[in-house]
């Protein structure tokens, strides 16, 4: 197993940072009306995760390992409508905690470096989203012009308190990517094809996602979690010569957060 840097682990860091949001939401539900909630918060955390590596022959940061071990420091700062964390920079424009429109800037992509292929790098994606109760929709576009990709996500997330100390976060969703994104990250161009790597041009695709995180509220500041997240991989990814033909991307995660 290999230890990868933070930009290699966006999939895991977004999941863990979403748990910080759950911590804040759970605390706010206990706090009273919206105007009584602090206009700022700072959350620190640390998590570890195991994730199967779906890439094949990836030369980026030791990407040959079958199982990736990630050790991840977490930080999230929010001040009024602005929040910064592993989910990127988000700014709420209108609405409140339950219904809101927002802008988002985040780093997106799956780095892949292979011999004889142009490096695939992540990019800054800028977009707009809408949160309506438990639903969250976001559409964003590659702002660096590397993939010219467009990403659209829709998630339904529910938080269930189980007494005073235990709660769960369950989420299901769909992540969709256009053909340009698919071509850049999973395609093989004619000049990159070899006897062992055929030319490949995938179409746009959508991935179903699901996650389940039980959490333990140790006190008003400290929370612990352990959970799992699953992505179903469609044929566009499964058939790519750059992957190991897996049908699932699975992460097992544990961590802790401290809210100041």
Image (tube, rainbow, N blue to C red):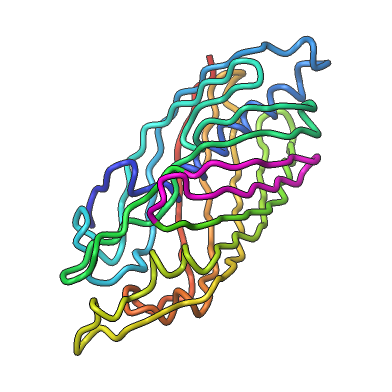
Magenta segment, which residues? Answer: 125-146
Image quadrant in which you'd find residue 126 = top right
Q: Residue at x 67, y 57 (%)?
A: 172
At horizontal 39% and vertical 70% (from top left) the residue drawn is 186
Residue 131 colored in magenta in the image: yes
- Magenta span: predominant SS is strand
Q: Residue at x 59, y 15 (%)?
A: 79
- Front residue of this view, candidates 146 and 9: 146
| In the rendered image, the vertical position of residue 99 relative to residue 173, given as above or below | above
Q: Residue at x 77, y 10 (%)?
A: 36
Residue 83 located within the stretch drawn in magenta: no
Pinpoint residue 178: horizontal percent, then vertical percent.
Answer: 55, 65
Which image quarter is the N terminus in?
bottom left
Instruction: Please indicate whether residue 121 sits to the left or right of residue 57 in the image.
Output: right
Q: Horizontally, is 70 left or right of 131 in the view?
A: left
Rendered view: 235 above or below 133: below
């Amino acid at each position: 197993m290999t230890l990868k840097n933070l930009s290699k682990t966006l999939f895991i860091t977004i999941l863990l940072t979403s748990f910080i949001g759950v911590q804040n939401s759970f605390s706010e539900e206990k706090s009273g009306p919206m105007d009584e909630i602090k206009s700022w918060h700072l959350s620190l955390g640390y998590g570890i995760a195991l994730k199967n590596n779906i890439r094949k022959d990836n030369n980026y940061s030791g990407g040959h390992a079958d199982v990736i071990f990630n050790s991840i420091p977490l930080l999230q700062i929010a001040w009024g409508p602005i929040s910064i964390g592993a989910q990127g920079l988000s700014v709420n424009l209108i609405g409140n905690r339950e219904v809101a429109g927002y802008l988002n800037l985040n780093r997106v992509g799956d780095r892949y470096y292979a011999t004889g292929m142009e490096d695939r790098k992540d990019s800054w994606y800028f977009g707009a989203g809408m949160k309506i109760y438990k639903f969250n929709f976001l559409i964003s576009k590659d702002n660096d012009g590397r993939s010219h990709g467009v990403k659209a996500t829709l998630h339904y997330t529910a938080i269930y308190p189980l007494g005073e100390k235990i709660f769960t976060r369950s989420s299901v969703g769909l992540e969709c990517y256009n053909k340009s994104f698919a071509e850049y990250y999973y395609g093989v161009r004619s000049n990159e094809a070899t006897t062992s790597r055929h030319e490949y041009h995938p179409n746009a695709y959508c991935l179903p996602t699901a996650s389940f995180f039980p959490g333990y509220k140790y006190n008003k500041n400290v929370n612990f979690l352990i959970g799992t997240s699953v992505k179903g991989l469609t044929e566009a990814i499964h058939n790519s010569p750059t992957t190991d033909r897996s049908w699932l991307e699975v992460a097992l995660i544990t961590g802790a957060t401290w809210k100041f």
